[in-house]
Image (cartoon, helix red, strand yellow):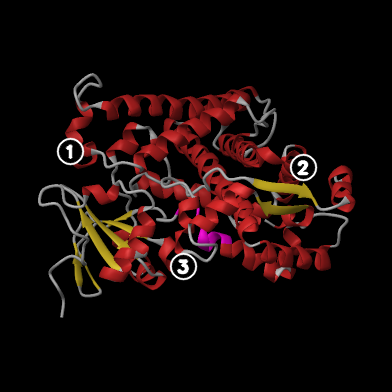
Amino acid sequence: MISTSLPPSPPKHWFWGNKYILGQPHRHVLFGTKYKRELGDIISTVTLNKTNIYLNTMELATGLLDKHASVTSDRPHDVMIDLLGWGTSAAFRNHDEVHKKMRRVLASALHPTIARSYASQHLDTTMSLLREVASNPSSFVESTDAAIGSFTVRLAYGYTPKTQQDPMLFLVHDAVRYLATSFSHYWLVNDFPLLKHIPSWFPGANFQKIAQKGYKSRMRYADTLFNKVLEQVRKGNVEQPSYVSGLLESKGGADLSGDDIYLIKWTGASIFTAGSTTTSSLIKSFFLMACLYPEAAKKAQGEIDSVVGRERIPNLQDRPALPYTEAFVQEIMRMFPPAPLGLAHLTTEDIEFQGYQIPKGTTINANICAWITCAGLLSVFDIQAGPRLAAQVASLGGRESERLYELTEPFGAGDPLPFDCEIKPRDSAALSVLDNSS
């Protein structure tokens, strides 16, 4: 029998609905534990003008998002994200013809065959990160952000940052920080879009001040890097081939249409931000995982030694021969997923699903955190929890506790919160690898 109602919902305010839940820290955990036990695997929330559905199993997400893809492929319109300048991103743009072109362009430029051609850049970036961590072990977080940021900005724009404090890296990280604020609060403007027209000085319009600063930051990094490559292409002196320069040249260089410029500019920006934030988050979570489970890290380390040896670090070709190390990395993604709620989808028609009626305009969230309760670093370093981290884990109930999520950022990409970690080269053989590798 088909119900005419939404899936079950947590307790609601008579007027605001579930507004207060949407601003809760670690919201994905709340839906994947407490509310999962109380309400099941399909949960709804409502605010004044919006309905959200949370799917707590892979089977449900596949059943709704894949089997009903024709009516669930759109993206929800988030006014605050638009005000921050992120509505142009491939991750957040509505699924119109431009978005379809963006996805095709990204897929053609980043499919597995092309991705394998970046192997030498992967190795260069890995060695750079290893040397930096060996020299400054207490700055492993900053070193990770800089290394991954450098790789993605080089891939997208052909620009190689000179230092960890490079102004281009600062621009993108600053823009991403503003984006994270859009997920950390309930914004009234999302339910009442007309509010976007009120001035920033108006009482209660602090969101406008945040949006204006975030928008400037977003445009500065996107415009600065893109315009630099565009000028090089038009002059015929591209310094370093890249995703952006390749597409600009394929479209005629100096004779680009406005549509081509828009498409290339914003897909390039999408590569940079998506690649730098999620990959960096995963590597920092690796350090945390190695601290929490040193015996598992040691076992993966032993596997690498037996397969690769001690004269070099692992590369992508070694991956099939390292099943335990692969499982170790997969477990990191299970425990600390970089995007725990995935990318939101929007229904464009009413849908009957699992006995419930999901109305048109509903936002669908695949709660990855609820589904699933880096090799080079292991080959070179011994990694142990510092005393503060050890005490913090103990206070949460130990490393098997369900509360380990409290070690991560409550909003955004799920980065680990600052923690102390003792990192040192394993022995002289490890130092020799760093010294001798080109």
Residue occupying the point 28% across, 49% down: 22
Q: Position of residue 134 (x, y in %)?
A: 77, 42
- Total numbered labels: 3
Q: Is 270 located above or below residue 258 in the figure?
A: below
Q: Which residue is mark 1?
A: 192
Which of marks 3 and 2 precedes in the sequence?
A: 2
Q: Give the CA separation, mark 1 to mark 2.
A: 51 Å
Residue occupying the point 14% across, 73% down: 3
Kind of residue at disc 1: Phe
Query: Left or right: where does residue 209 sit relative to residue 192?
Result: right
Where, quadrant-wise, is the C terminus in this rendering?
top right
Mark 1, mark 2: which one is toward the viewer? 2
Q: Which residue is mark 3?
A: 373
Which residue is the extreme one toward the top? 201
Kind of residue at disc 2: Ala
Query: Left or right: where does residue 230 sit relative to residue 409?
Result: right
Q: Give the CA separation, mark 2 to mark 3.
A: 33 Å
